[in-house]
Image: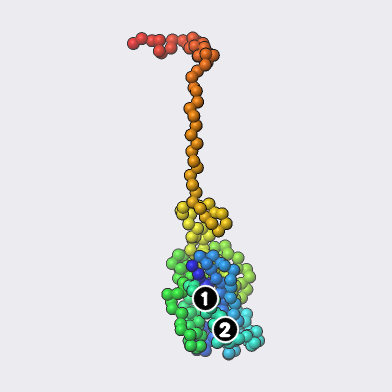
Amino acid sequence: MKEIVLDTETTGMDPGTGDRIVEIGCVELMNHLPTGKTLQLYINPERDIPAEATAVHGITNDFVADKPVFSQIYSEFIEFIEGGKLVIHNAEFDMKFINWELGQVGHKAIGWGNVIDTLAIARKKFPGSPANLDALCRRFGIDNTERTYHGALLDSELLAEVYLELLGGRQHGLGLAAKKTVSTGADSKKIQPAKKQKREARPHNASAEELAAHRQLLEKLKDPLWQKTG
């Protein structure tokens, strides 16, 4: 099962008022575990980045001046996420930007049936508790000390760890109740019960010496029960 943990950084809060994406970060999971494949795309938003946005993610106008615009990178993005569900924290925010950008280049929108919102999972699992990414990292003991700024790829890597913990931790999906197998490289074979070896009966009659020793022991017993009459 392929999943893509995804995050974006933007110039502001609403694409409807002219805000745009400046970074996309993705981490690929297979069966809930990272494959090592990541995608990081910096994008020229074709507008100024407000100082308050730069204060959040650290991305400046000068940095993105020579970066490609969304229409030049969207096919690489679509190819990376193809066939996987998107795992996003506060998915409503990121999806409105992604689908707005896709609409501008004539690509169909990504449906909500293909999105997993970890914010909703966290709120359901820990009602009343803080559910932002930093709070969840603290709850699960995930090191986020490098998160001086919000970065799309770094946040996706942290969210991948948080997502695993929300699913039940590192034991999730291990199939501990499955049938026992013996692994030999890529092959697995069912364990076969060991064949029982038939042994010949051994002689167990007492020897003359053992019988004599037994009689001597009985003579030492005082008033044995078997000599009493009713």
In the picture, measured across the screen, residue 203 lies left or right of residue 69, that is left
Q: Which residue is mark 1?
A: 81
| Observer-nearest of 186 and 131 | 186
Task: Determine whether the residue tagged by mark 1 lies in a helix, strand or loop.
Answer: helix
Q: Which residue is mark 2?
A: 73
Q: Residues within 10 Å of mark 1 (few under 14, many from 20)?
A: some
| Quarter containing the C terminus | top left
Residue located at (52% from left, 79% from top): 78
> Which of the numbered marks, if any, corresponds to residue 230?
none
Amino acid tagged 2:
Ile
Residue 55 vertical placement versus 116 (above, below): below
Q: Is residue 128 visible?
A: no
| Observer-nearest of 83 and 19 | 83
**Contact, mark 1 vs mark 2 (Cβ under 8 Å):** no
Residue located at (45% from left, 70% from top): 120
N-term mark: 1 or 2: 2
Q: Is residue 126 visible?
A: yes
Residue located at (46% from left, 72% from top): 116
